[in-house]
Amino acid sequence: MNITHTMPLIIDTLQFSKRMQKAGLQQKVADEFAEIFREAQTQSLENLATKQDLKNLETINKQDLNNLEQRLDVRIDKLESKFDSLESKFGSLESKFDSLEYKLTLKLFLMLTAAVGAITWLDKVVN
């Protein structure tokens, strides 16, 4: 791929007008066409970006991306902190459930032991 750099088209409006007059246009019409080309040319040149404009834009874009990255890092850190806090709370709940399970198992064992003892005692009393 061959990339060529082209310069903006610059028209000598006086020569353009003279050539148009030679071709048969009235001077007023030829001058008006030349003025239209001059205005279009000026507007085109005013809207061209320079290398410095592009470098400035690149710098601004890099700064914006860096700012965005920093803001995202802060938000990610906050989310990680919240997840750590939730993990800690779930660990605490798990410990409480384990403690409750132990207490309930112990109470169930005591109730069963008491029931077996009561049944044994009743069996001895009735027989």
Image (cartoon, helix red, strand yellow):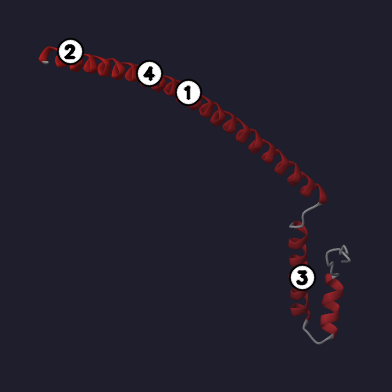
In the image, 25: left or right of 64? right
User: Which label lies toward us, 3 or 4?
Assistant: 4
Going from N to C along the chain, the mark reached first, 3 or 4, is 3
- The crowding category of the residue bearing disc 1, from other C-alpha atoms within 10 Å (few below 14, some 14 to 19, many at least 20), is few
Which one is nearer the viewer's eye here, 42 or 99?
Answer: 99
Image spot of residue 103 (x, y percent) = 34, 16
- Type of amino acid at the residue the image marks with label 2: Trp
Q: Quadrant of residue 68?
A: top right
User: Which label lies toward us, 4 or 2?
Assistant: 2
Separation of marks 4 and 2 at Cα, in angstroms: 28 Å
Residue 121 bears which disc, if any? Answer: 2
Going from N to C along the chain, the mark reached first, 4 or 2, is 4
The residue labelled by disc 3 is: 37
Q: Quadrant of residue 66?
A: top right
The residue labelled by disc 1 is: 91
Separation of marks 1 and 2 at Cα, in angstroms: 45 Å
Separation of marks 3 and 2 at Cα, in angstroms: 119 Å
Image spot of residue 51 (x, y percent) = 82, 50
SS of the residue at dot 2? helix
Going from N to C along the chain, the mark reached first, 4 or 1, is 1
- Type of amino acid at the residue the image marks with label 1: Gly
Which one is nearer the viewer's eye here, 28 or 122?
Answer: 122
Image spot of residue 125 (x, y percent) = 12, 12
The residue labelled by disc 4 is: 102
SS of the residue at dot 4? helix
Q: Quadrant of the C terminus?
A: top left
